[in-house]
Image (cartoon, coloured by chain):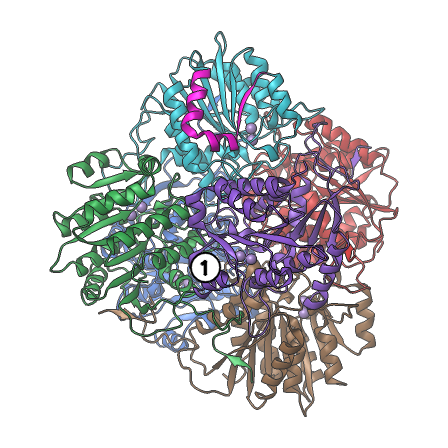
Chain colours: A green, B blue, C red, D brown, E cyan, F purple
Amino acid sequence: MYLTKKSRLLKDPHDIRMCDNSASSSVVFVGIPWDGAVAGRPGARLGPAKIRTAFCNLPKRVDVEDLGDVDVVIGDPAETWQRVEKTFRSLKDRQQILVAGGDHSVTPYVYRGLSEGRKISYVVLDAHFDLRTVSEGLTSGMATRLVKESGGDIPITVIGIREWSNPSYMFSLADKMGIEYYTIEQVHKLGLEEVADRVYQQHKNYKAYLSIDIDVVDPAFAPGVNAPSPGGLTSREVLILVSHLSKALRPIAVDTVEVSPPYDVGDITSNLAAVLLYTSIWSR
Amino acid sequence: MYLTKKSRLLKDPHDIRMCDNSASSSVVFVGIPWDGAVAGRPGARLGPAKIRTAFCNLPKRVDVEDLGDVDVVIGDPAETWQRVEKTFRSLKDRQQILVAGGDHSVTPYVYRGLSEGRKISYVVLDAHFDLRTVSEGLTSGMATRLVKESGGDIPITVIGIREWSNPSYMFSLADKMGIEYYTIEQVHKLGLEEVADRVYQQHKNYKAYLSIDIDVVDPAFAPGVNAPSPGGLTSREVLILVSHLSKALRPIAVDTVEVSPPYDVGDITSNLAAVLLYTSIWSR
Amino acid sequence: MYLTKKSRLLKDPHDIRMCDNSASSSVVFVGIPWDGAVAGRPGARLGPAKIRTAFCNLPKRVDVEDLGDVDVVIGDPAETWQRVEKTFRSLKDRQQILVAGGDHSVTPYVYRGLSEGRKISYVVLDAHFDLRTVSEGLTSGMATRLVKESGGDIPITVIGIREWSNPSYMFSLADKMGIEYYTIEQVHKLGLEEVADRVYQQHKNYKAYLSIDIDVVDPAFAPGVNAPSPGGLTSREVLILVSHLSKALRPIAVDTVEVSPPYDVGDITSNLAAVLLYTSIWSR
Amino acid sequence: MYLTKKSRLLKDPHDIRMCDNSASSSVVFVGIPWDGAVAGRPGARLGPAKIRTAFCNLPKRVDVEDLGDVDVVIGDPAETWQRVEKTFRSLKDRQQILVAGGDHSVTPYVYRGLSEGRKISYVVLDAHFDLRTVSEGLTSGMATRLVKESGGDIPITVIGIREWSNPSYMFSLADKMGIEYYTIEQVHKLGLEEVADRVYQQHKNYKAYLSIDIDVVDPAFAPGVNAPSPGGLTSREVLILVSHLSKALRPIAVDTVEVSPPYDVGDITSNLAAVLLYTSIWSR
Amino acid sequence: MYLTKKSRLLKDPHDIRMCDNSASSSVVFVGIPWDGAVAGRPGARLGPAKIRTAFCNLPKRVDVEDLGDVDVVIGDPAETWQRVEKTFRSLKDRQQILVAGGDHSVTPYVYRGLSEGRKISYVVLDAHFDLRTVSEGLTSGMATRLVKESGGDIPITVIGIREWSNPSYMFSLADKMGIEYYTIEQVHKLGLEEVADRVYQQHKNYKAYLSIDIDVVDPAFAPGVNAPSPGGLTSREVLILVSHLSKALRPIAVDTVEVSPPYDVGDITSNLAAVLLYTSIWSR
Amino acid sequence: MYLTKKSRLLKDPHDIRMCDNSASSSVVFVGIPWDGAVAGRPGARLGPAKIRTAFCNLPKRVDVEDLGDVDVVIGDPAETWQRVEKTFRSLKDRQQILVAGGDHSVTPYVYRGLSEGRKISYVVLDAHFDLRTVSEGLTSGMATRLVKESGGDIPITVIGIREWSNPSYMFSLADKMGIEYYTIEQVHKLGLEEVADRVYQQHKNYKAYLSIDIDVVDPAFAPGVNAPSPGGLTSREVLILVSHLSKALRPIAVDTVEVSPPYDVGDITSNLAAVLLYTSIWSR
Ligand SMILES: [Mn+2]
Ligand SMILES: [Mn+2]
Ligand SMILES: [Mn+2]
Ligand SMILES: [Mn+2]
Ligand SMILES: [Mn+2]
Ligand SMILES: [Mn+2]
Ligand SMILES: [Mn+2]
Ligand SMILES: [Mn+2]
Ligand SMILES: [Mn+2]
Ligand SMILES: [Mn+2]
Ligand SMILES: [Mn+2]
Ligand SMILES: [Mn+2]
């Protein structure tokens, strides 16, 4: 019989993929299949499955332990977020945690779990400030606000803000809240390395959390998102930026959020998220 | 100046569309942009907008009053369902109510609102029984169960069941619960008119509620759904069936649910839902 | 060298395709790349190229002469229609003419060209009556009216009318104009053969023109159209109907119109149009 | 921690899926990720993965053992087919074998493996005769010819032939080779049960192999194929036909071939193939 | 009752969108749903509806008055263009006019309407020169020529020319006609600011009209166009360029043309056009 | 009659397209419709047809002779590659050969045919090293290795390598084999002109072969490939790079390979390949 449970058509014996070795590791991969806070286009619950497939298919021998997905509860955000927080509290001794979201509302709870008993600074790549307050209901556009509320006087930096995709009041609000930000024009003018260096200077005395809202990338490179905004980073720019930031900051956790497969084209958004997670592994 | 706020390119003065007359009417149209109970592929929250556009674009002069959408609360199913129930309680004197969902979880609350103080029987077109009980979380696959629990000893009939898309225990459960059903093979064998006639006999002494889970239709005709199942009704069959049932039963309300635009192709699913709602207006 | 201008990957020497023999024939194929009268979704100008490719790729040895396309003038409907009329006037001695539209506005001019000096009856498969009068501008929804105006007291039959896609006044107008029609429900009830037979009885004393507005087919089978309407014929039904009508009526011309490639999915609409044209060749 | 390797969002404890029990069974599932003989649109190599996912996701408790995929060799058809043949020779004592192709060229080798030392009759659902002889190279359009050459004087029946998609010489060739066939028009006229019954009469004294070339289905229901042909079976018709044939013939093996995911829309073709394989299990 | 005609799922009371305030303003928005001059892929008639939706959904409080669409006449370019011209003649006292096309053939008539009695210079972003002369029929590739013929000895600058998408004679013709141009390579070498500055120097003594043929953008960022050409501007580059030009030149009108929704992917082209129009408002 | 076999809707008499003059030329165009070595996503066999259509539609008057396609043999790589080699051996006196693949496995055989009796250096744009050795079967990921084995001690340069898409052992293997490479980060840092100049210095004493694996381009610009990798060149960068390299090296042959139309979006990948081939013609 010529039967195989792992039908790889390419027969290169040296071609070891990311998840071929499933041993325990100090670097872990966790999915959070949750999009219950999205007020616009849902679908990010399907992100972890796609990102994991792409991640595991990368032809690299790096030890990463796939812990599976957080067991979310459809329709119950409070319970789900509590599970997220508890889960990551139990993981806080791992060297680096890779998180595949899920909408951006999960980030503050990952952050809370990991920051129990310690100060963690927050760097986020996002087209949006995520500083909203809603009169009722939920939105994933509150992530930065909630991190701020949990983290206290930690440094927070948002990179990739699009002027045309944020209400005007957000800019002054960010200033008032002490949140540093770089608009996409500033990134364009300063250059990726200068931005990365400034962020490093700001955060170097902290353990850092790096959150990547994939809508920081232009919709040409990342069509599969809840809230696309033109003028974003190219795929190469975001890869270089994440590489610089990861090497410099050695973040204890990195997430990619807001990947919405129903709106993706040829899986390019989830593939990019997977490569970003790989790129962020500073210990490799 | 040659400016128009209503840029219709076809200049046929006799071409009056469904919503050109926005006057008060005994027939009303309500949307429910909610998909918070879907455990699989979300997107039905975007159904009402698409169905309304297609409905309003039908070249028919029928008086229908568009009441807008129920003001749902993202992330709060209990509050949302209560709003749905209260809204329809206030509408129960209208002759016929057309509802554009939304996932199937809204149907029991529309039903509750309308059935306050009276017995209403329930006819549902669906590939699935929707009799699930979940250990935690939500699913739109509980709709029939919840209607049954609200309605008491009313007749309930499910039409279009696919054997391959329902757990085996559901068939005996339906029997135990006194729920009549027609599998797609039975519909095929009996013919649409015979099925419609049998359903009429079963329900003729009741005011009826007609719920159309668009997944009763084959995915070739209705790709934009949460839980597609092959072997379904053709678009013509579902139109004929709804026409027969509506003329016979004169339902007080008709809904089309589970239309998920992110998974649709060329809007054919939402267009079909719109034509089904039009077809169901027995007073036209 | 192993170079070939006709790179057919299938190497079956018996596999002769429709257009492998380009000789003169009494059956001709003509395209009309024109969509200048469409008031809704344009694109039918691209129909002839797609239909021709599919037609020529059919694995059948039937003599058909491809005459190319009518040389239309973008932005000048009057000139274009005159060219259409003159072109087909010069072709009227051919035994059977296959026309790949183009929007439905070309049909009256093909008809005029061919009916010079003789009475030709008109059978049209369409979801719509095409009896509109516009206050200004153009629409392809006038085709039947214009044929009627040209043809005089010839029999005209429309098959496949959808009640929900035609203004109500059209039904009485059709009666007033002496136009026979079969709604899709009537086709469903009577059966294809009965309809074909009745049409034959009506038209048997005339040379007939058969026009196929591809929107008579359900959008599941023919998504690439200007004005999709659910509840239509299946592909098999339309093939059987065209086969019956062609064998019975031996039409002097058959057109497929309103195929709009930008809205097609996997070319299934243009492929169906090509097979319909092939099926209509009563001399094969 | 709330981590799960099997993140099922629906929390119905009674919802057991096809592959939740992975125990040994007399019914087996085998994939063949091979499309090396396709002369047109490749992609069927990706069929098994998609069909398996859909099959395993069916909410049914039937014991089926997933044996994985045949270990094919890209670029080496002879070796691959030999592996297919050997693999199925070793499986021939299983009660029923479900095969997910792959292009139709694998069928003759599955057949050879299973028919070692016994006569097996052949029933195939296909738009095409698959009786081609090529002057060089390969085609999946030779499957029926190769089965005939292996099987000898067994009964062979092809159901679903489209006149417009087969060279004319094939019809007389089929007659000459003693191959029974039903065109799609004959299926339409006779009805599914009559066809199934006639096939049963023809094959009842044999163990039967049932091959389902998914292109027997209309492209509206099965767009993801190598060689689409309009006028085909609907999804419901093919399900009813396969159900009848399987119950009557109790085939020792059933395959679904020519499913080409790159050309699919919303996975409806692979989902249909999965339901067909499920439906064919006569022992359930 | 909890009914709303404006079902916004995000409940942020500070989230005011562009068109929430519909008051009179010195900045106006006008659509021109016309693609009657396109010789290739039509569809731009559907541009205004999509661009308006995206524009109105921007989370910015800027006073813009939406005047609706020019009432075009399908099939009658002369009448339509006259209406365009008359409409904009009546609008010429507005501070800034935002135009959502439509194909590029409307630009010369907007220009004529606005330039009555005054000299207006012309800056156009385009992959093409649009200097064609046709022997018959229409093309949207004549826009620059027609502006030149209307405007006389005004400065005209074309930015973004692709060498591979223009006939060679066009380059010398542009020189002969005194039309300044920047190829995409020149833009690449000089940089956006240098180009913007040079254009400013050339036009600073004039009131300027800024026309944005969206095909100046690369098809990765703007797939929904009539005539895509690779190597174009990125979305960020075009946003920066339009920002610079608008701030410097304070144009009296800005149009985005050639957006063809049937060819778009996820509405990214119409979204980009909307953000470009927003970005061009120099008075904000 | 107004019939035309070449229905060009644009009536600009000066608009001469690439293939309007089909005369003999020192520059030739050859397609190779072959994807038999792809281990992943097939479809490149359909590349030549799409690339040719786009190439011939370019509005440029350059003499190029279209020789058609190599007559490949489905399922027989050895025979096909031999035909490729023999074909190009017979073409080696042409000044410049443009090749439209096909998967990358054809390049070594084009190279062999052309390098008979002379040393030809090899420059390849690729996301991948293509230095694989497989234990059985084929892959198009061996192209560079096979060229190296044929070419001997010629200079070989790979441009565009993505770290995340190549096994780690490949980097040291490339060094060991004396293969020069530029990762995408190096290209980013050095700039296109510096890279082109370094490559020129390395190859200037050789006749050069330039191979363009279209996956060197980012999937946003080139989604239609077998093995997409994010972070790639933009369309403009690859055009500039190919322009520099072609002008400097005056390559005797240029190929574009791995264009897979089934995975393309709006034909942007094949259009880009066509413009690249045009751009590479250094004699124009
Ligand atoms: Mn964001
Ligand atoms: Mn965010
Ligand atoms: Mn259902
Ligand atoms: Mn349901
Ligand atoms: Mn019609
Ligand atoms: Mn019509
Ligand atoms: Mn077949
Ligand atoms: Mn077959
Ligand atoms: Mn242009
Ligand atoms: Mn232009
Ligand atoms: Mn590559
Ligand atoms: Mn390669």
- Vertical placement of residue E67 versus B141, above or below: above
Q: Residue at x 55, y 88 (%)?
A: D95
Left or right: where does residue B57 sit relative to residue C195?
A: left
Q: x and y percent of residue A39 in the render?
A: 30, 48
Classify C1 as above or below E58.
below
Boundaries of the magenta span:
E178-202
Q: Answer above or below: position of F283 versus D190.
A: above
Q: Name the subunit of mark 1.
A: F
The picture quadrant where one finds residue B147 is: bottom left
For image coordinates 45% across by 15% down, the residue present is E203
| Three-letter amino acid code at the position of disc 1 | Ser
Q: Residue furthest top?
A: E117
Q: Is residue C246 left or right of residue E163?
A: right
Q: Residue at x 42, y 34 (%)?
A: E237
Name the chief secondary structure element in magenta. Answer: helix
Circle 1 residue: F165
Residue in the foreground of this view, choosing between C68 and B74: C68
Q: Nearer the viewer, residue D1 or B136?
A: D1
Is residue D166 at all visible to an observer of this figure? yes
Residue E91 appears in the figure = no
Q: Nearer the viewer, residue E56 or F95?
A: F95
From the Cβ of disc 1, is ligand 11 less than 8 Å away?
yes
